[in-house]
Amino acid sequence: MKHEIIEFQDVSIIGMAKDIAFCHPEECGKFWAEYVERIIKPVVIEGRVPDAFQQAALDNGIGEYALCTCGIANHDCATCGAENFVPCNTRTFTYVIGGIYKGGDVPHGMSLYKVRNGRWLKVHFEGGLAAFQEQFAKFQHEWLPSHPEFSWAKDASTMEWYCGNPESPDYQCGVMMPLEG
């Protein structure tokens, strides 16, 4: 898998958040549908004048990232997913559809989330959005264990990243994980 190291310093993600039960990860897709209905359809597709919420989304690139975080102490997201995404687990994680906060008002219905400072591994998936889940599983269960030089930071969120038109064969996406040390 193509990958690179990036740095984050004093970055926050602004976005709309939803608590999702680990046993219902399909709710993430439904949340993206809500995002499209609330922001993309009225403003981008229908050409309406954006309200304050929609304007904040546009100004901050909301939809470029999805931040996954939870309140489980002293864990890393690699083992968290493996341990918690099981049919009977009703614990929740917070899924944030967001963008890098560039300043300005944070409208009702959005929040800010501080991103861990330091080095992050950015992994590029192949196959576009249609292959995201398959590529994430391959990354988590095959690629990452074969690259022990990358250690997932404890008590840190993970992020998905998206770039381009999801309908295009050139669509790019992947995952980013904070590195220990």
Image (cartoon, helix red, strand yellow):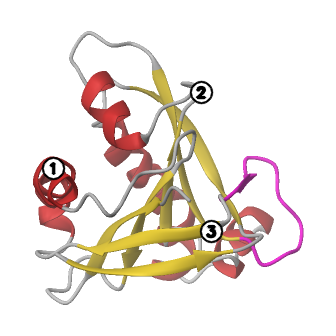
Tell me the number on the disc at residue 159: none
State whether residue 74 is above or below residue 37.
Answer: above
**Residue of label 1:** 137
Q: CA distance from mark 1 to mark 2?
A: 22 Å
Q: CA distance from mark 3 to mark 1?
A: 25 Å
Disc 2 or disc 3, which is closer to the eye? 3
Disc 3 residue type (three-letter) = Gly
Q: Residue 110 placed where, x, y %?
A: 73, 51
Decide which of tag 2 and tag 3 comes sooner along the chain.
2
Tell me the number on the disc at residue 118: 3
Q: State the residue lying farthest toward the bottom.
A: 170
Secondary structure at badge 1 equals helix
**Residue of label 2:** 71
How many C-alpha atoms fall within 10 Å of the one at disc 2: few (<14), some, or many (≥20)?
few
Magenta highlight range = 101-115
Quarter that holds the N terminus: bottom left
Disc 2 residue type (three-letter) = Gly
Residue at horizontal 32%, vertical 64%?
A: 149
| Residue 49 shows in the view | no
Q: Is residue 165 magenta?
A: no
Secondary structure at badge 2 equals loop
